[in-house]
Image: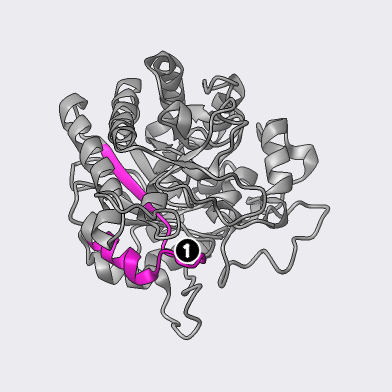
C-alpha cells in the first residue's frame, strides 16, 4: 500500500473517526425523483463510489419547498423522505465511509418554474447579476425564523435517517451566503446592514443545527459548514469579510469548514497583487480550531498529497470521482497507473451516470470533464484566477 498522508485516519474532537482524509464533495447530479425522493439510479451511483473514501458528502438537499433550486434535486423538507434517505445513508456508509447530508436553501439562485410558479426568495429583493435570473422577494422576519427552524428539522431528519453528519451549504451564492453578502442583503433590520447583522442568519442556522443535534443524536454527529471566500459582484463578500466570519465560525460548535473553490491554491479574485493562497489565509485564521476540507481541481494522488503537505486536514476530490469511482482503492492497491482521468460517453452505464446527470455535465461542467473525444476548453480548465462553474460561474 502507498504511504500517502491522505490515507491516514482522522478523529474529530467529538470522537468520530474517519478512516482516511479523502472526501467526495457534494456534486449536483439532478437524478432525484420529481418530488425530491432518492431514486434507484442515485443509490447505484452512491454505492459505486462509497466504501473507499473517509467521507462522502451527498448532493445538496433542500430544507423547504421555497428552497428548491433545480429539477432532480434531493429534498429533506418532510418526514416522508426519511425511509429513502435511510437507504441512501446505508448505501453511502459501505465499508466504514462516513455519510454526510448537505442541506441548503437556494434562495435567489432558483426560479419560479422550479418553485411551481411561486416567486423566489432571498434576503432582499435583488436579482443575481446573471443573465435570465429572476428578482426575488425579501423574506419576512417570520419567514427567516421559520427557515432557521426548517434547517434544524432537516438536521433532525438526517439524524433519524442514519447519516453521520450534515453539511450546511453556506457557499456558492445560495441563501446562507446571500444573507452574508452585501450584494444580496440590503436589509436595514436586525438581519442586515452591518457585517455583524449580515452574519446573524448563518450563525443562527449553525446554532439551531447544533441544538437539534444535542436534542436528537444518540451518538456523536458531525456538523460541517461550507463557505465561499469571495464574491466578484460589487458590492460583494470580500476576503476580509470571510476571514471575519470564519473567525466566528471557528468558535462555533462545528466539526469542520469546507472551503469551496475551483482551485485549491487559488489566490484572490479581486486583488491580483495578493499572491498568498486563500486557503493559507484561512488556515492561519482558523489556527487549528477546526479542521479544513479543501476542494478544487484535484485529480492525481500527487496533487492530493500536496494538499496534505500544506497542512490542510482533508482533500476533496470531485470531478475525478465521477470518472473514477475506485480512485482510492487503486491508490491503496498500488494501481495508480490504472486510474481513469477521462470519461467517454460509452462509459456512462458503467459509471451509473444518468441521462440527466450527463446532460448537466455536458452543459455547465462540459469544459472541465475531460471527455475523451473532445478537448477541454483551454480558458476554463484552470480556475486559479476565476470562479468555477460550481461556484456560480456561467460558461
Range shown magenta: 222-247
Identify which residue is drawn at 72% across, 55% down: 370
Dividing the picture into quarters, in which one does residue 98 lie?
Answer: top left
On screen, 268 above or below 167?
A: below
Q: Residue furthest right?
A: 373
Q: Is residue 154 left or right of residue 337?
A: left
Q: Within 10 angstroms of label 1, few (less than 14), some, or many (20 or more) residues?
A: many
Q: Is residue 342 visible?
A: yes
Q: Which residue is mark 1?
A: 231
Q: How many marks?
A: 1
On screen, 84 above or below 123?
A: above
Identify which residue is drawn at 27% across, 71% down: 284
Horizontal and vertical percent position of residue 154: 34, 28
Dividing the picture into quarters, in which one does residue 324 lie?
Answer: top right
Dividing the picture into quarters, in which one does residue 322 lie?
Answer: top right
On screen, 221 above or below 244?
A: above
Amino acid at each position: 500500500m502507498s504511504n500517502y498522508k491522505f490515507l491516514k485516519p482522522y478523529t474529530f474532537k467529538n470522537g468520530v473517526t474517519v478512516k482516511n482524509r479523502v472526501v467526495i464533495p457534494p456534486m449536483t447530479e439532478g437524478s432525484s425523483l420529481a418530488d425530491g425522493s432518492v431514486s434507484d439510479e442515485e443509490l447505484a451511483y452512491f454505492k459505486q463510489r462509497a466504501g473507499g473514501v473517509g467521507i462522502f458528502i451527498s448532493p445538496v438537499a433542500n430544507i423547504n419547498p421555497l428552497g428548491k433550486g433545480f429539477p432532480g434535486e434531493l429534498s429533506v423538507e418532510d418526514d416522508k423522505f426519511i425511509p429513502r434517505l435511510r437507504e441512501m445513508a446505508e448505501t453511502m456508509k459501505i465499508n466504514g465511509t462516513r455519510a454526510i447530508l448537505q442541506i441548503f436553501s437556494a434562495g435567489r439562485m432558483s426560479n419560479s418554474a422550479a418553485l411551481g410558479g411561486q416567486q423566489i426568495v432571498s434576503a432582499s429583493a435583488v436579482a443575481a447579476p446573471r443573465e435570465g435570473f429572476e428578482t426575488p422577494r425579501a423574506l419576512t422576519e417570520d419567514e427567516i425564523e421559520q427557515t432557521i427552524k426548517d434547517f434544524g428539522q432537516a438536521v433532525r431528519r438526517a439524524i433519524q435517517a442514519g447519516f453521520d453528519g450534515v453539511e450546511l451549504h453556506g457557499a456558492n451564492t445560495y441563501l446562507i451566503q446571500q444573507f452574508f453578502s452585501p450584494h444580496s442583503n440590503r436589509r436595514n433590520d436586525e438581519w442586515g446592514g452591518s457585517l455583524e447583522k449580515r452574519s446573524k442568519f448563518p450563525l443562527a442556522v449553525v446554532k439551531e443545527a447544533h441544538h437539534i443535534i444535542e436534542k436528537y443524536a444518540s451518538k456523536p454527529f458531525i456538523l460541517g459548514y461550507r463557505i465561499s471566500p469571495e464574491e466578484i459582484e460589487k458590492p460583494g463578500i470580500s476576503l476580509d469579510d470571510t476571514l471575519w466570519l470564519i473567525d466566528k465560525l471557528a468558535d462555533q460548535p462545528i466539526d469542520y469548514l469546507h472551503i469551496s473553490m475551483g482551485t485549491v491554491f487559488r489566490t484572490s479574485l479581486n486583488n491580483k497583487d495578493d499572491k498568498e493562497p486563500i486557503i493559507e489565509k484561512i488556515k492561519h485564521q482558523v489556527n487549528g480550531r477546526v479542521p479544513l476540507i479543501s476542494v478544487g481541481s484535484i485529480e492525481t494522488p500527487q496533487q492530493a498529497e500536496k494538499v496534505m503537505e500544506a497542512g490542510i486536514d482533508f482533500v476533496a476530490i470531485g470531478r475525478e470521482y465521477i470518472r473514477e469511482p475506485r480512485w482510492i482503492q487503486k491508490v491503496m492497491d498500488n494501481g495508480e497507473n490504472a486510474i481513469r482521468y477521462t470519461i467517454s460517453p460509452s462509459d456512462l452505464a458503467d459509471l451509473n451516470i444518468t441521462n440527466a446527470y450527463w446532460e448537466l455535465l455536458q452543459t455547465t461542467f462540459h469544459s472541465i470533464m475531460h471527455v475523451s473525444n473532445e478537448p477541454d476548453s483551454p480558458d476554463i480548465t484552470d480556475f486559479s484566477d476565476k470562479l468555477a462553474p460550481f461556484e456560480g460561474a456561467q460558461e
